[in-house]
Image (cartoon, rainbow, N blue to C red):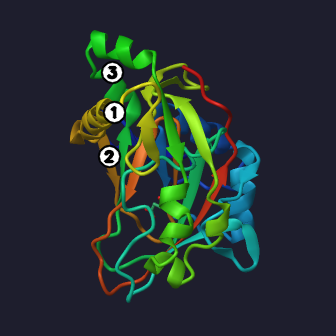
Amino acid sequence: MTPTVLPMTGNVGAEIINADVRNDEHWPIIRQAFIEHSVITIRAQDITPDDHIAFAQRWGDINVNRFFTPLDTHPNIAVVLKNPEDTSAIGEMWHTDHSYDTAPAMCSILHAIDLPPYGGDTCFSSQYAAYDALSDSMKTFLGGLNAWHSSRHAFGAATTDHEQYQGGRLHNAEKATQDALHPVVITHPLSGRKAVYVNPDFTTHIEGLAKEESKALLSFLFAHCQNPDFQCRVRWQEGDITMWDNRALWHKAINDYAGHRRYMHRITVEGCALSA
Ligand code: SIN
């Protein structure tokens, strides 16, 4: 069977059916769909953790997340878990994976192992579309700015009383020492398109602005960048792989399945330093 790529919206996202991530002949189609749509959901992948790793390595070296507790047998795979008794979901605030690193992960590859009977979708927002919708004057202003991103407030020592640390879903709080400065608008290293690159979870302030100026500008951008017109929503089925481009998107795990378990495996792939 030949894979079929079905766009989810006019701005972002595609579903791919009849594909197998292990199949060399399907690889160019999957790669092209990822470049064009920024997030792809490859349906029904009956694969092992080793297959997941091999698929990730087609894209580049694996970047092991320091804070997510790994799979016992495969330290390269991060577990994304919510138990029936947990109240919080990992990644439930809009964010970009690893923006606190100087060379943020280029993509994340999530495999759905065990899903709740309803809910637990993941939303994505295109930061290409967010940039394109800004006025020319705002684009020029933002083009000269850089912003700081940090892991400290999200994963550091002050957060270890949180359920996700207490329940063992996160670890290594002492490794939350990263702050990174990135352009507020980046030029995507693969597509050459401009994208807004600040996010509500990890961006702390804009360099060179007064505290209140930075707060007001980030608050405008955080509201602007989550316009539903820029979004798509992945409704998971067991076995699906969704992979997304961290330089072009925000994402958010929807926490609407209280009392049920959701269990995923995630691999992040190395990226590079970003420029304006
Ligand atoms: C994440 O933020 O990487 C997790 C997304 C999800 O669980 O849907």
Does the beta carbon of the residue at mark 3 sit less than 8 Å from ligand 1?
no
Secondary structure of the residue carrying numbered label 3: helix
Where 245 sits versus 189, above or below? below
**Disc 1 to disc 2, C-alpha distance:** 8 Å
Residue 46 in view (yes/no): yes
Crowd around label 3: few <14 · some 14–19 · many ≥20 (10 Å): some
Identified at 36% across, 84% down, the residue is: 260
Q: Quadrant of residue 196?
A: top left
**Disc 1 to disc 3, C-alpha distance:** 11 Å
Disc 3 target residue: 132
Q: Quadrant of residue 32?
A: top right
Q: Quadrant of residue 92?
A: bottom left
In the drawing, what numbered circle is on residue 39? none
Identified at 75% across, 67% down, the residue is: 50
Q: Is residue 249 left or right of residue 2?
A: left
Question: In terms of sequence position, does the residue under pointer 2 or pointer 3 come before the other?
Answer: 3
Disc 1 target residue: 11
Crowd around label 2: few <14 · some 14–19 · many ≥20 (10 Å): many
Asked if marks 1 and 2 touch (Cβ < 8 Å), the reply is: yes
Residue 43 in view (yes/no): no
Asked if marks 1 and 3 touch (Cβ < 8 Å), the reply is: no
Where 217 sits versus 119, above or below? above
Disc 2 target residue: 232
Choose between 238 and 100: the one closer to the eye: 100
Secondary structure of the residue carrying numbered label 1: loop
